[in-house]
Image: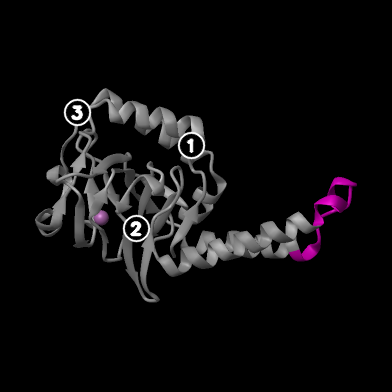
């Protein structure tokens, strides 16, 4: 499932994150690459222990935790602390690769299985040429270039690349999620069901506000959602 989360960062948070990371010292992006991806990776990355990276990461993590669409789409069990990258000038692309299956956080030695890959766009699309995130899935290639502040999540199993940036600069935040529900197809079913129940609930909200009980169908569907989650979740 490829999911767009609009305005994962509010404009003031976006401005703060950009200001923090633009002033920091960047390094070669191969610091976190595996041997296959390292051979095709040519970008800049913010060392994760820099104070600016820590502050920016905190802003992003706080924004994600309060976002219901993020939580219901990912069902996160563990999130790898967000990282930041920069494409432009001579360091401007990342060729086809699949992200490592397990990331180990250096500071905590915690493992995160990368069920879901996320990119949070931090540059307005009109400010740079190229830089599309191209994700291969069973429906063909998806070319993704979202507004600054928007986030895309896609299965960690996908081959993907970032096209060369030929003008301007593409700043982004990226990270991985280990989900309580490992299989993408199961997460997708749960997401669809959750969205449908939310829409039904929206239709009934006027009557419920006047004191009526929720319909028996909503109660039963909500029960099915939780019983499926109970069957599939690993917490
Ligand atoms: Ni990647």
**x, y (%) of residue 209?**
85, 46
Decide: few, some or many residues near mark 1? Use Cα within 10 Å; few <14, some 14-19, many ≥20.
some
- The Cα–Cα distance between marks 3 and 2, rounded to whole angstroms, is 30 Å
Q: Nearer the viewer, mark 3 or mark 2?
A: 3
Disc number placed over residue 25 in the picture, else none: 3
Q: Which residue is mark 2?
A: 115
- The quadrant holding residue 182 is bottom left
Question: At which x and y percent is residue 152?
Answer: 42, 54
**Ligand 1 is within 8 Å of the C-beta of the residue at disc 1:** no
Q: Residue at x 65, y 63 (%)?
A: 196
State yes or no: residue 207 in magenta: yes
In the structure shown, which secondary structural element does the residue marked by tag 1 occupy?
Answer: helix
Q: Is residue 27 left or right of residue 166?
A: left
Q: Is residue 228 above or below residue 123?
A: below
Kindly identify the residue that appears in the image at 54 percent across and 61 percent down.
Answer: 191
Residue 39 relative to residue 135: left or right: left
Nearer-N-terminus badge (3/2): 3
Report helix, strand or loop for mark 3: loop
Closer mark to the observer between disc 2 and disc 1: 1
Marks 1/3 in contact by CB < 8 Å: the verdict is no
Quarter of the image for residue 95 reads bottom left
User: Considering only order in the chain, which callout, 1 or 2, is on the residue closer to the N terminus?
Assistant: 1
In magenta, the rendered stretch is 204-217
| Residue placed most toward the observer, 187 or 125 | 125
Q: Is residue 6 left or right of residue 81?
A: right
Residue identifier under label 1: 63
Disc 1 versus disc 3: distance between alpha carbons? 24 Å
């Amino acid at each position: 499932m490829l999911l767009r989360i609009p305005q994962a960062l509010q404009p003031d948070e976006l401005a703060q994150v950009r200001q923090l990371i633009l002033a920091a010292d960047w390094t070669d992006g191969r610091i976190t690459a595996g041997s296959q991806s390292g051979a095709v990776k040519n970008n800049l990355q913010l060392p994760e222990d820099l104070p600016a990276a820590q502050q920016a990461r905190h802003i992003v993590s706080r924004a994600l935790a309060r976002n219901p669409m993020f939580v219901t789409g990912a069902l996160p069990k563990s999130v790898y602390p967000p990282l930041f990258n920069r494409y432009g000038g001579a360091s401007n692309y990342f060729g086809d690769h699949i992200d490592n299956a397990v990331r180990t956080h250096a500071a905590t030695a915690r493992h995160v299985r990368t069920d879901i890959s996320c990119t949070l766009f931090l540059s307005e699309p009109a400010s740079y040429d190229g830089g599309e995130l191209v994700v291969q899935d069973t429906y063909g290639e998806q070319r993704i270039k979202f507004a600054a502040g928007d986030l895309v999540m896609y299965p960690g199993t996908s081959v993907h690349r970032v096209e060369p940036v030929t003008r301007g600069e593409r700043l982004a935040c990226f990270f991985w999620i280990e989900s309580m529900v490992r299989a993408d197809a199961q997460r997708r079913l749960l997401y669809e069901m959750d969205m449908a129940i939310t829409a039904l609930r929206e239709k009934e909200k006027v009557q419920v506000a006047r004191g009526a009980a929720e319909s028996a169908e909503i109660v039963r569907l909500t029960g099915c959602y939780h019983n499926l989650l109970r069957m599939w979740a690993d917490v």
